[in-house]
Amino acid sequence: MIILLLLEFSVSATEYPLNITDSAGREVTITAPIKKIIVLNSDAAEAVKVLGRVESIVGVTDSVKKKSYYFPELQDKETVGTWKEFDYEKIAELAKNEITGRNDPTLVITYTFKLEPAEKLEGIENITVVAFDFYKEEKLCEEVEKLGKILNMEERAQEFIDWWREKRAAVEDAVSKSISAESISEGELANEILSYLRATYLGTTEGHLDLERLRRHAWFYVHGSKPWVFIEGTAKGLEDIATKGNGSSDHATCTLAGGYNIAGELGGAYPHVSWEWVLERNPDVIIKGVYTSGWGWSGVEEPAELVEDIKSRPGADSIFAVKDDRVYVCCNEPLYGMDSVVGLTYWAKIIHPKLDLDPKAVYIEYLTNFMNISYPEGTIFVYPEV
Amino acid sequence: MKEVKKRGRGEVGGRRWKIVSLIVSLLLCVCAAVAVVQGSLECVERVIPSAPAPNSVFEVTLKIKGELPLVVGIVEEIPEGFSFEGTDYEYYEVSGQKIAFAAINVSEIRYKVRAPSSGEGTFMGNWIDMLGDKEGDIAATTVIVGGGGAGAIGAEITPTPTPAPTVAAVTKASRVIPFLEAGKEVGMAFKDLDVSMITVKSNKNVSNMKVIIERMERPADIPEPLGIPYTYFEIKLEGEGIESAEIGGRIEFKVDKSWISDNNIDETTVTLSRYDEKEEKWNALPTYKVGEDDTAVYFEAETPLFAIFAITGERKAEVAATPTPTPATTLMPTIPTQSPTAQTTPTQSPTTPSPKPSGCKASFVFISLIVLLLLRKRRGERNK
């Protein structure tokens, strides 16, 4: 009842028509308060849920239904297609008011790279298509703010944006301090070099860093203590491993988390490399992102096996990531979309283990405050645990 | 008899030759450094007085060429009889005649050395780029205590061989292959070396294999290969399982266009040869041109194993048929290290010319001409 009253209040506070520019650069006019929402992907569903309008969703794609752990309340909603193919007749049908026979003001949310719905539904009374992605870090707050305006949930949108920015800033601050604290001083580096030269050229037998480790320390001294990270996606064998380059959201996450993405210097956002290339680059940390069949892993067996698979590859024991036991697998769920700041916090903790950050606590805040669901105790999102 | 006389003249003038050659090599190293524009660390050079006074303390300067930031490990070895007297640089360590420096974001390091009462000695050194994967030698520098006057050194001292006319930015580099799977090829690219790519293939799995490539002078006990040598280098392999494996591969190398044109080399005769230590002979490898750019021509050759290699070329046929004396022919007999064959063959070029930036080539010719004129003048005075 209180929610309904609040909704009424916010609705009455909005002036129509409302003009906005969506993320595809389209000028969109909302002529009346939105009564129904049809989401064509799970990122849009999550954004609508975070803004408190999940009850207005009348149609979803099957990708939304697959995430029953995030959207239990949407399991009985009408399906309007898959994430890439849509049933436009169904969408039009769902927009219709059974009593008046006319369409209720209906918002259809699609990705910016899937603009077919805008063409197909153009001219149909009261159906407005907007293109937002909700997974691109640099546009996320702007998109949430615009969706807040469209749905008359501006305060809620601002609440989320403030929280998201606060958590992001916490990571940036911690990473910055960590890089500064872990940085190698000139004197330390000089001593390491002299130890190496003593042992290699002057005939002493004292312990020293090997040349590769020494060179990495020299790099840290010059560029800051940013561990070299290899982001592994799907591996189709040792000759074909998908990774993330400059332009991908993982690259941005890695950089924000204080890592140096070794594939960032390759061309393209989604390059493929061989295992030999990885060995040659010698990363300090390997992070393998996994689309789990459910929400994370219920036990350690599966993620442990994935880690072991990487560690047992030919020559793996020659790289720092394996020598230092820093090969991780991560569930991709909290890495992309509205909860990406949770994934960012996990990655920062992986890359800089000494950081005073608690990724689990951040996830709990997100789930309870914005998604109205409980944290699944015992579920593994990152392995080994950080 | 005539030849002995010639050699004797060279011995008398040997000390001056040393000084001249030092100046030449220093100038050329500076020239090479100017020509190299890419990369962080280019090379490390040593600046040192060629003739310190007996028992004097003199300064040695190590010039670290390249753009900051620079992190370099340097080891200097000072000759016996000379003693290290200290440095203002903070990060160093001394052990016997060796001094290690950790050069961090500095473009030069100076240290002091005390000279003995007489004699000569050669300073040597090497460097490791900690921000790249390059290693190299600092060109050896010979100094003569007392300025090389008649009483300073005995007449029997053979003049120090002149260093290669140019000093490449990198003389040594290595790569580690964590795992070389049997039957699979692994390629390694090299920058600033004559060899631009080495591809290795083994018949057995090999772990942690280190591939070391080093530019070298031809050792005296190895015969000269056929043709005009461009450069020599050695490729060594280290690692577990190397001994029992057959490891061959392909070598891509580049040859400076200026060397080809200056020596009138027939490009199609450029050959990579491998030295067979058992047979004590050079084996020419099938060599193919694979490309070229503004400054160099690129070739590739397959080798069944890795050892000492030479890149050679032959002069174009029409030039060989009508040899014409060049200024270098007059100069050559006076170069103490020149072989008799080279001295008597008018069209023979100086031995082991090294690859170098084209600007340096011109400088080398210019300096050679000055040396030539000085020698002619000296001879003229003597004849009077």
Image (tube, coloured by chain):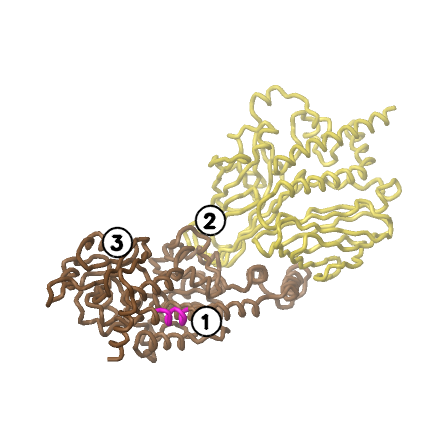
Chain colours: A brown, B yellow
Q: Position of residue B135 (x, y in %)?
A: 61, 52
How far apart are labels 2 and 3 at the CA level?
A: 45 Å
Horizontally, residue A75 falls left or right of residue A162, namely left
Q: Note whether A322 is above or below B15 in the view shown.
A: below
Quarter of the image holding residue B163?
A: top right
Chain where mark 3 sits: A
Which one is nearer the viewer's eye here, B220 or A49? Answer: A49
In the rendered image, which residue does mark 2 sit on? B187
How far apart are labels 2 and 1 at the CA level?
A: 36 Å
Horizontally, residue B114 falls left or right of residue B161, namely right
Q: Note whether B4 is above or below A208 in the view shown.
A: above
Residue type of the residue flagged with mark 3: Leu
In the rendered image, which residue does mark 1 sit on? A349
Q: Earlier in the sequence, mark 1 or mark 3?
A: 3
Q: Secondary structure at mark 1?
A: helix
* Number of numbered discs: 3
Which one is nearer the viewer's eye here, B108 or A200? Answer: B108
**Both labels 2 and 3 in a single chain:** no
Residue type of the residue flagged with mark 1: Lys
- Disc 3 crowd rating (10 Å Cα; few below 14, some 14-19, many 20+) is some
Q: Position of residue B345 (x, y in %)?
A: 67, 26
Predominant SS of the magenta segment: helix
- Please give the label number shown on residue A115: 3
**Outermost residue toward the top in this view:** B322
Q: Note whether A72 is above or below B346 in the view shown.
A: below
Chain where mark 2 sits: B
Which one is nearer the viewer's eye here, B35 or B223? Answer: B35
Quarter of the image holding residue A51?
A: bottom left
Chain where mark 1 sits: A
Horizontally, residue B17 falls left or right of residue B352, namely right
